[in-house]
Amino acid sequence: MIFRLVVTGVPVPQGSLKHIGRGRLIPSNEKKLKVWREAIAEVANEFTTDSGFDLPAIVTVVFTLPRPKTVKRLSVTVPPDLDKLQRAVGDALSINCKLINDDAQIIEWHSRKEYGDVGGAVIQVEFLEQ
């Protein structure tokens, strides 16, 4: 079973946590991250079941970042870090929606980041039958 999600918007990494008092931690970029994860969930909800899928998953993602006007290089070799972008996707698929029950079900990642005219991500989730 394979699901392909096309999400528009600027990809936001799930980075460090900051302490806000009384033992509470929140993402350091909470507002932008929330918008990005909700955009992923909105697209994923088309495929979501009430209980989510409880199968091992392979996730392939191509993150497209808007090219800054002054950048001439072809590859995105600057932040955001690819692993932090992946973390935001994994949590969006398991917390913001229930396409998968837990991001620990992701047994393999394939991802890259590239420049484009507009930001977004193409996310493919392949569930492996057991």
Image: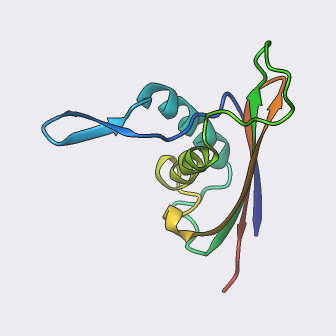
Task: Report x, y in % for residue 124.
Answer: 75, 56
Asked whether 40 or 10 is in front, the reply is 10
- Answer with the quarter of the image where residue 10 lies: top right
Q: In this orientation, which residue lies closer to the viewer: 81 or 110?
A: 81
Locate residue 87 relative to residue 43 in the image: left or right. Answer: left
Identify the residue at image location x=60%, y=42%. Answer: 81
Residue most extreme to the top: 69
Display coloring: rainbow
How many labels, in total?
0
- Would you say residue 101 is visible in this rendering? no
Judge whether 24 appears above or below 35 on screen.
below
Q: Which residue is pictured at 68% across the width and 28% down the height?
A: 9
**Residue shown at the point (55%, 70%) measured from the top left:** 105
Left or right: 30, with 2 as reference point: left
Rendered location of residue 71, percent (x, y): 80, 20
The quadrant of the image that shows the C terminus is bottom right
Query: Residue 61's spot in the image, x, y percent?
Result: 73, 51
Name the residue at the bottom extreme. Answer: 130
Tell me residue 104's x, y (percent): 50, 67
Determine the image quadrant of residue 88.
top right
Q: Which quadrant is the N terminus positioned in?
A: bottom right
**Residue 104 appears in the rendering:** yes
Residue under the point 59% across and 48% down: 89
Q: Determine the residue located farthest toward the left in the rendered image.
A: 22
Nearer to the camera, 79 or 28: 79
